[in-house]
Amino acid sequence: MSALNLPFDIDDMVNRLRPWITCESPTFDAAAVDRMMDVAAFDFATAGAHVERIPGRLGYGGSLRARFPHRDFGAPGILVSGHLDTVHPVGTLEKLPFRREGDLCYGPGIQDMKAGNFVAFEAIRQLVRAALVTPLPVTFLLTPDEEVGTPSTRELIEQEALKNRYVLVPEPALADGGAVTGRYAIARYNLRTTGRPSHAGAALAEGRSAIARMAQKILEIEAMTTDDCTFSVGVVHAGQWVNCVSSSCEAEALSMAKKQEDLDRGVERMLALAGEAGDVVFEVTRGVTRPVWEPDQPGTMALHAVARDIAREIGFELTHASAGGGSDGNFTGALGIPTLDSIGVRGAGLHTLNEHIEVASLRERAQLFAGLFTRLR
């Protein structure tokens, strides 16, 4: 039996995907992420994989490594690198329940990237059931913190990738169904303003508002955006009582650039904003960074060529592009390891209450992964 003709039953796949989606797993809830790892671990174990649970650190959940039996077990092979954390807090299922409506299927984290991980798993599960042997051993590494920049598992991902020939990342497909063969560099920043508290009614003039200063700085930061490097502030926390001048405000910012040197200059500009004015201190601390994954690396393009040929047999054209938005492919691609990213399912609305996938892409992408598992050497 050809790998592309394996019995990928869409109705069955939707039913078995359900537990992955209904187990909510926001990054900052380590216990919830660990519950999701339990769900995946059971499925991998029943498929015949050697499953390892790797403890979490820095307050995040743990990771899961699953390796399938192979005559060359332990030799360099194929790494599927994915994450099981999502941006959706526990309780999102009440607003975005798992449901299938015609050609679409909805749920928190279904597009980014639980369904992608699931179809890669389904591909190897069906290969094992059909007794089809892959030329190379296959390893899955599923991690808990990608949505916040992978602060606790970057080293784990890089070390696992260095032991393998290829890395496949089942992040959501591009809008046209294409893959990602390069990614922009990204830096995160923690911002803090410290002012002076006072009663907002009786002694307003005595206070120095950390919120007001942060608001000014946010406008200044976002005004630094150019075609070469973008800046945005996405998180702000401050205040508890409206009748108090807030003495503390915290925020998080992000910068992104196509070239590493542009990001490095952006980091310098951001750090240079720190200082004191009007009795309010503004602090900038650099957070996690994703290195640029330069596009058109020969190994990655050769990997894409194999995937493109498989896709044509399936019946679609697998385009490729360099993309913004970080993934763990930044790390493996920057190491020079042939990496093919965003070969997960088709869909839209990721990170929103309209997150959904195209149901037909479950079979399409499972076929793609099965083809890659059986043809890469």
Image (cartoon, rainbow, N blue to C red):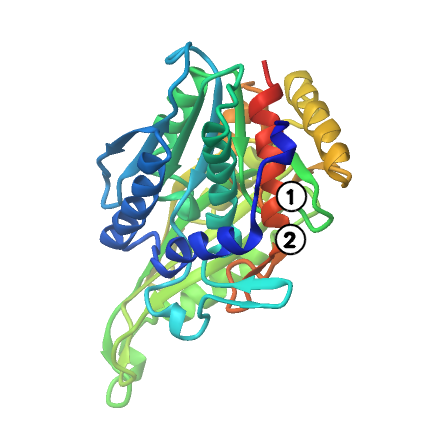
Residue 130 sits above or below residue 39 on the image: above
Q: Along the line of sight, which residue is nearer the eye, 358 or 48? A: 48
Q: Is residue 324 visible?
A: no
Q: Which residue is mark 2?
A: 360
Q: Along the line of sight, which residue is nearer the eye, 32 or 225? A: 32
Disc marking residue 364:
1
Q: Along the line of sight, which residue is nearer the eye, 209 or 249? A: 249
Residue located farthest toward the bottom when viewing the structure as drawn:
201
Judged from the image, the secondary structure of the residue bearing numbered disc 1 is: helix
Asked if labels 2 and 1 touch by Cβ distance under 8 angstroms, the answer is: yes
Residue 354 sits above or below residue 295 on the image: below
Mark 1, other Cα within 10 Å: few <14 / some 14–19 / many ≥20:
many
Judged from the image, the secondary structure of the residue bearing numbered disc 2 is: helix
Q: Which quadrant would the N terminus be assigned to in this image? A: top right
Residue 75 position within the rendered picture, expressed as x and y whole percent measured from the top left: 42, 10
Q: Is residue 247 visible?
A: yes
